[in-house]
Image (cartoon, helix red, strand yellow):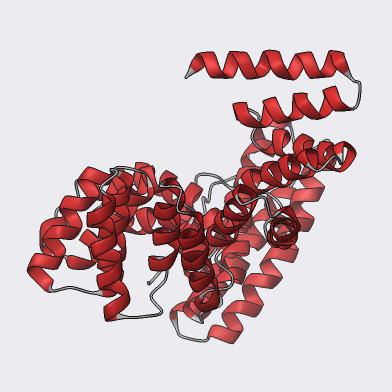
């Protein structure tokens, strides 16, 4: 992805007011000459010289800006204009340094420089686009979504929309990804886009739409293990468990270690109350994919349902070490600890879960139970009241 250079148009030249002292306008003009020299080095391909000149201009500009902000002269209107010119120069230096870093594949460093460009002058052309692309290429999708969204509002286009949709997919904002991909002009002809759209649909529980997308993909482009898994998940979300099993078994035939096939079979068996089969499938998933957090959590649910808390608790503790913000796992651990009589340890987990997911009714109920066990009746009643309110909203 090539990021656009911001050239000398970023440097907003202009004479200082005639009654301003010569020193301040002179310093700003000198800074702008330094920037022009840096840009000339850049245009002539002298990249090392350009980088040195830009960094020198940043140091020079910081001193000039500090002097303008601390001094009483020139008068306020002239000082504001001079500050604007300095900030524009600083933004241009940061932006072009960022572009140089991005072209060398140092996207994290580029993003840091683009952030500074935006701080210096929020109106720098294309800074949000450059920042979003840099974060995207650095795989910092959580950081990319904000600037990419702002860039898309400024300059709508299908490529930028796809990049933002991919960032939303990677941050698990599946509804947002699906909404962006739904109207893509190349969706019907591009299998990769269809796959991404179907994935966003199935992950956002829009199973009927997802099923149509994956069925069309399989019909047009042939079966694959990944497609069969997603089609099976779409069937499962609609309660079509036999069709789901058929697709998932097909996926495992095509690729025995395909991700999420056994895990989804485990969830289906759990929903049907077939706990032994659920455990077997989830353990098969974790044998191939031991870091699968959802499979770990679901295995703990199965073990708890089988009255095997001693096996469930260490699974949940390991999971929470890796993902401390997983409120459902924390709730489950608190619930198991409370059932085992350790109300104090349960309270710690349930209070944390309530902070992470304040609108989850079941967490409020279990937290109330923990308070009640510890004799804190007023706090218990508060949680039970919250539980009733949250249930009433459903």
* Image height of 100 relative to 127, above or below: below
* Left or right for 8, reference 71: left
Which residue shows up at 61% across the image and 63% down it? 113
Residue 245 occupies quadrant:
bottom left
* Left or right for 228, reference 8: left
* Image height of 85 relative to 254, above or below: above
* Left or right for 56, reference 279: right
Q: Quick check: can you spot residue 196?
A: no
* Image height of 234 relative to 109, above or below: above
Which residue shows up at 32% across the image and 55% down it? 233
Looking at the rendering, in which quadrant would you find the N terminus?
bottom left
Q: Nearer the viewer, residue 78 or 304?
A: 304
Q: Residue 194, image x and y in percent?
A: 21, 59
Q: Residue 52, image x and y in percent?
A: 66, 79
* Left or right for 182, reference 348: left
Q: Residue 192, image x and y in percent?
A: 23, 67
* Image height of 128 relative to 103, above or below: above
Q: Nearer the viewer, residue 271 or 217?
A: 271
Which residue shows up at 28% across the image and 43% down it? 238
Q: Quick check: can you spot residue 178?
A: yes
Q: Residue 305, image x and y in percent?
A: 60, 48
Residue 91 occupies quadrant:
bottom right
């Amino acid at each position: 992805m090539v990021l656009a250079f911001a050239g000398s148009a970023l440097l907003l030249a202009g004479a200082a007011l005639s009654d301003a002292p010569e020193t301040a306008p002179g310093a700003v003009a000198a800074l702008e000459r330094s920037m022009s020299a840096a840009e000339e080095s850049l245009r002539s391909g002298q990249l090392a010289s350009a980088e040195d000149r830009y960094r020198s201009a940043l140091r020079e500009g910081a001193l000039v800006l500090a002097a303008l902000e601390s001094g009483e002269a020139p008068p306020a209107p002239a000082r504001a204009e001079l500050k604007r010119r300095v900030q524009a120069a600083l933004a241009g230096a940061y932006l072009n340094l960022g572009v140089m870093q991005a072209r060398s594949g140092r996207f994290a460093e580029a993003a840091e420089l683009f952030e500074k460009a935006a701080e210096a002058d929020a109106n720098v052309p294309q800074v949000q686009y450059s920042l979003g692309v840099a974060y995207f290429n650095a795989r910092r999708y959580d950081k990319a979504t904000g600037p990419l969204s702002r860039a898309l509002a400024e300059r709508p286009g299908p490529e930028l929309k796809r990049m933002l949709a991919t960032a939303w997919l990677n941050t698990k904002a599946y509804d947002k990804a699906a909404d962006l991909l739904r109207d893509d002009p190349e969706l019907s002809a591009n299998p990769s886009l269809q796959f991404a759209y179907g994935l966003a649909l199935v992950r956002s529980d829009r199973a009927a739409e997802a099923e149509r997308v994956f069925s069309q993909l399989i019909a047009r482009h042939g079966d694959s293990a990944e497609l069969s898994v997603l089609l099976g998940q779409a069937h499962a979300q609609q309660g079509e468990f036999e069709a789901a099993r058929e697709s998932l078994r097909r996926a495992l035939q095509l690729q025995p270690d395909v991700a999420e096939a056994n895990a989804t079979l485990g969830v289906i068996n759990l929903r049907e109350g077939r706990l032994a089969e659920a455990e077997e499938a989830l353990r098969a998933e974790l044998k191939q994919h031991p870091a699968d957090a959802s499979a770990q959590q679901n295995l703990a649910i199965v073990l708890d349902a089988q009255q095997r808390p001693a096996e469930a608790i260490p699974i949940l503790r390991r999971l929470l070490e890796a993902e401390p913000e997983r409120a459902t796992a924390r709730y489950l651990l608190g619930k198991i600890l409370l059932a085992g009589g350790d109300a104090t340890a349960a309270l710690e987990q349930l209070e944390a879960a309530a902070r992470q997911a304040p609108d989850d009714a079941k967490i409020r109920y279990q937290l109330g139970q923990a308070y009640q066990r510890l004799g804190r009746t007023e706090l218990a009643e508060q949680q039970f009241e919250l539980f009733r309110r949250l249930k009433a909203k459903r």
